[in-house]
Amino acid sequence: MHRSCAVSLSGALAGLFACAVTAAQLDGDIGPRLLRDAAVRAALDAARADEPRTIADQIRLCEIPAPPFKEAARAEAYAVAFRAAGLTDVRIDAEGNVLGQRQGRAPRPHLVFSAHLDTVFPEGTNVAVRRDGAVLRGPGIGDDCRGLAVVLAVVRAMNQAAIQTPGTVTFVGTVGEEGLGDLRGVKALFRDTLQGQVDRFVSVDGSGFGITHISVGSVRYRVTVSGPGGHSYGAFGIANPVHALGRAIAALADVRPPADPRTTFNVGRIGGGTSVNAIAAEAWMEVDMRSADPNALGALERQFHEVVDRALSSENARWDERGRLSVAKVLVGERPAGRLAAEAPIVAAAVSVTRALGLPVELTEGSTDANLPMSLNIPAITIDAGGQGTGAHTLDETFDTSDSWRGTERALLTAIALAH
Ligand SMILES: [Zn+2]
């Protein structure tokens, strides 16, 4: 920022303009102000004119399978597209994220503008995309092939209109955003690849026009109760892992988390035992807990530990410690929670841009790649990528391309705004 203003003191006209824009930073007027810039308007026109190509990219990328932990083929194709679009220093990091740079007048502020490569669909899923008038059908077509295509479109439009941003943008395709991936891509990005170098983060994810400024956090555990087990009749009188699990589930079911901030729990899967006439040697459950508030989530997590430990001691005490049970609680998923006020500069800028383009403003909560930077106090949002989608995470997912260019324009203007 200071560097841009120093340039303006030299009297260069471009510098003066840069200073005016940067000095005001991300206030709620950045949208209308950017629209007065001829180069920005040219970029928006380019994005709109280029929308058929954006849709073609969306289909092409989506037909490359990207199951959890197996995003490599799609990542390769994305890297090729990044190079073709003119990004520099295009690379794939150790975790599998694809990165490409677009230099601004200065290295900072440094914006990461991203979409996720992975899908929820296992290997072998038919990922062919069918076109039905304006509607595209195929698994992942909206979430997040749309985001991937829009990120590419933003690069192309910025280059076609020779947009010069004060700060630098790194465009990224992340791995591991969906459930099982547990945000492994974005975690690696902030822990290793770009550690300490990111000032702002945007994930372009899914369809519509929402702006996600509240990150719902989650913790997930797999709980396994173990004991010696034995014959249901012959060994009767020892502690029973299935019974202990039952006690734990009953106690969990009685927990009353706060309604505001919304905080939830779920025992999603249970299992164990080998036979109706055997005392099980093992029983297990998988538990999911969520909240947009880190404190509420932490409190619920502590309750969960207490409840499970108490259930175990009750079952052991019931049988006078005969066939004593043990329990393992393994954390199998962790997405940190976070929230930004609607007035936070990055949110205000996205709202301003959305309004300036005549689009509806819809502030939402969600669980996305933005959770991670938000938890590190790095300004982060997730924006929808336009169009209309249905059936995310199902084989019947659809994406309606009618006026989808509006989402591309919004993403473009957001990227330009946040590179200030
Ligand atoms: Zn997604």
Image (cartoon, rainbow, N blue to C red):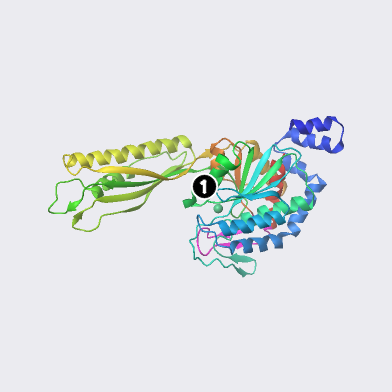
- In front of the other: 287 or 343: 287
Outermost left residue: 234
| Residue 63 pos. (x, y %) | 59, 64
| Residue 37 pos. (x, y %) | 80, 44
Mark 1 lies on a secondary structure that is helix
Q: Is residue 300 left or right of residue 81?
A: left
Above or below — where is 353 with respect to 160? above
Secondary structure mainly formed by the magenta segment: loop
In the image, what residue occupies the spot 31% across and 41% down? 308
**Residue 15's quadrant in the figure?**
top right
Q: Which amino acid does label 1 sit on?
A: Arg
Q: Is residue 388 magenta?
A: yes
Q: How crowded is mark 1: few (under 14 residues within 10 Å), some or many (20 or more)?
A: many
| Residue 183 pos. (x, y %) | 52, 47
Above or below — where is 313 with respect to 122? above
Above or below — where is 260 with respect to 232? above
The residue under label 1 is 184
Instruction: Tell me where the magenta segment starts and ends, as one range.
Output: 386-404
Of the 4 image quadrants, the one containing the N terminus is top right
In the image, what residue occupies the spot 58% across and 50% down? 97
In the image, what residue occupies the spot 31% across and 50% down? 284
**Residue 51's quadrant in the figure?**
bottom right
- In front of the other: 133 or 298: 298
- In front of the other: 329 or 79: 79
Of the 4 image quadrants, the one containing the C terminus is top right
Does residue 102 appear in the picture of this structure? yes
| Residue 185 pos. (x, y %) | 55, 47
